[in-house]
Amino acid sequence: MSNELPKSIADYIAGSNAHDPDACAACFTDDAVVIDEGRERKGFADIRAWKEEVTGKYRATVEVVAAAKANGRTIVTGRVSGNFPGSPVNLRYAFTLRGDKIARLEIVP
């Protein structure tokens, strides 16, 4: 299903599954915002640090189970497996794109 996603989103998921914070961060605009685990990260450096932190902590992989467009966003439901209680879980990734990059990502259960 990820081949139906916009390139930056597909690349972000591929980078996440490869545990590559640099590849993930490259998918975002310089002023992007990520909201995950109740925290907000802003800008390239903060987003890269976040991705490195969660990659080391959870070693998670994402399997895309659904994708839809709504209100100018691409909503991806991913089955996330990793080193955390309750694994695997379904999470919703709400991506907002600007041009060919991710400008905003909100991750919620």
Image (cartoon, helix red, strand yellow):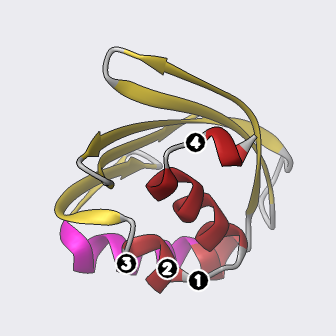
Q: Which mark is residue 48?
A: 3
Q: Specify whether residue 48 is painted magenta.
A: yes
Q: Residues within 10 Å of mark 4 (few under 14, many from 20)?
A: some
Q: Residues within 10 Å of mark 3 (few under 14, many from 20)?
A: many
Which residue is under mark 4? 5
Question: At numbered mark 1, what does the secondary structure look like: helix, strand or loop?
Answer: loop
Residue sitting farthest toward the left: 31
Distance from the alpha carbon under mark 3 to that under mark 4? 22 Å
Disc 3 versus disc 2: nearer the observer = 2
Q: Are marks 3 and 2 in contact (CB under 8 Å)?
A: no
Q: Which mark is residue 20?
A: 1
Residue type indicated by callout 1 = Asp
Measured as percent of width and height from the top left, residue 12 is found at 53, 62
Residue occupying the point 58% across, 55% down: 10
State which region is magenta.
Answer: 43-54
Residue in the foreground of this view, choosing between 37 and 106: 106
Distance from the alpha carbon under mark 3 to that under mark 2? 9 Å
Measured as percent of width and height from the top left, residue 54 is found at 56, 71
Distance from the alpha carbon under mark 1 to that under mark 4? 19 Å
**Dominant secondary structure (helix, strand or loop) of the stretch shown in magenta:** helix
Residue occupying the point 73% across, 65% down: 60
Q: Are marks 3 and 1 in contact (CB under 8 Å)?
A: no
Q: Are marks 3 and 4 in contact (CB under 8 Å)?
A: no
